[in-house]
Image: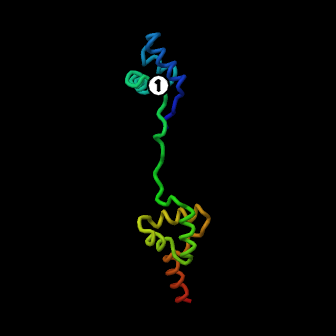
Amino acid sequence: MATIYGLDFRQRVVHLRKDKNISVKKISKLLLISPESIYDWLKREKTTGNLAPKTGYQRGHSHKIKDIEAFKKFVDSNPHDSAKMLAEKLGNVSKATVAKVLKDIGYSKKKDFWLQRTEARRSRNI
């Protein structure tokens, strides 16, 4: 997994390369970092003049259901619907997304039609 090195460490590495004229290979062995990282830092300093790590690029995915309170009201107004039926009524959301949000807000998964069918078969066989 990638490690984000701090600005002071990056500045020390670039200082070793530029001012002390130590090779990238020696620096990488001495400090146990990848030579590619050093080359990236040198390139970044040359192009932008800044060695600071990038920020804001790890945002994750956007959520389909953004307003949880409105979703709670929607579920409360449809108390007997399954996750699949709720997803169909919402339109652009999958059953899995609805089930996950229901679990996150502490609601039950609601009805599962597969479970109802198996229970109906069991009751017929008794």
6 vs 64: above or below = above
Q: Taking 32 as reference, is 81 above or below it?
A: below
Local SS, label 1: loop
**Residue placed most toward the observer, 1 or 45:** 45
Q: Residue at x 60, y 68 (%)?
A: 107
Q: How many marks?
A: 1
Three-letter amino acid code of the residue under disc 1: Leu
Q: Position of residue 117 (x, y in %)?
A: 49, 81
13 or 93: nearer the viewer? 93
Q: Is residue 2 above or below residue 7?
A: below
Q: Quadrant of the C terminus?
A: bottom right
Residue 102 x, y percent position in the rendering: 56, 65
**Frontmost residue, 87 versus 118:** 87
Crowdedness near tag 1: few (<14), some (14–19) or many (≥20) residues, C-alpha within 10 Å = many
Residue designated by label 1: 51
Image vertical order of residue 83 relative to residue 56, above or below: below
| Residue visible at 47% across and 25% down in the picture | 51
**Residue reaching furthest to the right:** 106
Q: x%, y% of residue 87?
A: 46, 69
At x 55%, y 78%, the residue is: 80
Can you give x and y, in whole percent of width and height, for residue 14 in the image?
46, 18
